[in-house]
Image (cartoon, rainbow, N blue to C red):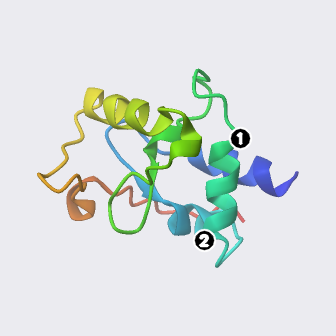
């Protein structure tokens, strides 16, 4: 199984209405310290893909990582999260104490 496959397997476990950080996914997938690699893996996903809930992965500050390279995918991410009931404060942050996924397992 490739590293990206491990990342995607982990992301598929995030339930609706919850989020995980890039670093958290890296740790759960057994690739500690590779948050950036998780970001690269998320960037590779077709945003119309329903199989991998890419939109549930955010940065450690509780924010969507906005970028012009995402060609609007970041705004789609916010919309999808809001549809799941996740609220953003006035600064555009998600309360991680409330919405961060707390699994009781590690895949690797």
For this rendering, which residue is in front, 91 or 95? 91
Image vertical order of residue 97 relative to residue 52, above or below: below
Q: Earlier in the sequence, mark 2 or mark 1?
A: 2
Foreground tag (2 vs 1): 1
Q: Position of residue 1 (x, y in %)?
A: 88, 51
Residue drawn at point x = 56 percent, y = 40 percent: 70
Left of 20 or right of it: where is 52?
Answer: right
* Helix, strand or loop for disc 2: helix
How many marks overall?
2
Q: Residue at x 62, y 51 (%)?
A: 10
Q: Estimate how packed mark 1 is, as few (under 14), some (14 to 19) or many (20 or more) residues with alpha carbons within 10 Å.
A: few
Location of residue 18 in the rendering, given as x and y in whole percent from the top left corner: 35, 46
Horizontally, residue 52 falls left or right of residue 61, namely right
Foreground residue, 71 or 106?
71
- Indicate the quadrant containing the C terminus: top left, top right, bottom left or bottom right: bottom right
Residue hosting label 1 = 44
Determine the residue located farthest toward the left in the rendered image.
Answer: 90
Q: Using the rendered view, name the quadrant where residue 9 is placed.
A: top right
Q: Residue at x 48, y 45 (%)?
A: 14
Residue 85 is situated, as x and y percent measured from the top left of the image, at: 22, 34
Q: Which residue is mark 2?
A: 27
Left/right placement of residue 108 relative to residue 102 reads right
Instruction: Depth check: give the residue in front, 99 or 90.
Output: 90
Gap between marks 2 and 1 measured at Cα: 20 Å
73 or 86: nearer the viewer: 73
Q: Is residue 22 left or right of residue 19?
A: right
Question: Which corner quadrant of the image does residue 80 belong to?
Answer: top left
Compared to residue 76, the image places residue 23 above or below, namely below
**Can you give x and y, in whole percent of width and height, for residue 50 in the image?**
57, 23
- The extreme bottom residue here reads 33
């Amino acid at each position: 199984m490739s590293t990206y496959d491990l990342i995607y397997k982990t992301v598929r476990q995030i339930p609706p209405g919850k989020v995980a950080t890039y670093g958290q996914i890296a740790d759960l997938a057994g690739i500690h310290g590779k948050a950036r690699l998780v970001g690269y893996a998320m960037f590779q996903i077709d945003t119309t893909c329903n199989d991998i809930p890419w939109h549930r992965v955010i940065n450690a500050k509780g924010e969507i990582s906005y970028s012009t390279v995402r060609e609007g995918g970041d705004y789609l991410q916010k919309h999808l999260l809001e549809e799941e009931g996740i609220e953003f404060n006035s600064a555009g942050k998600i309360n991680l104490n409330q919405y961060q996924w707390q699994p009781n397992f590690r895949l690797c």
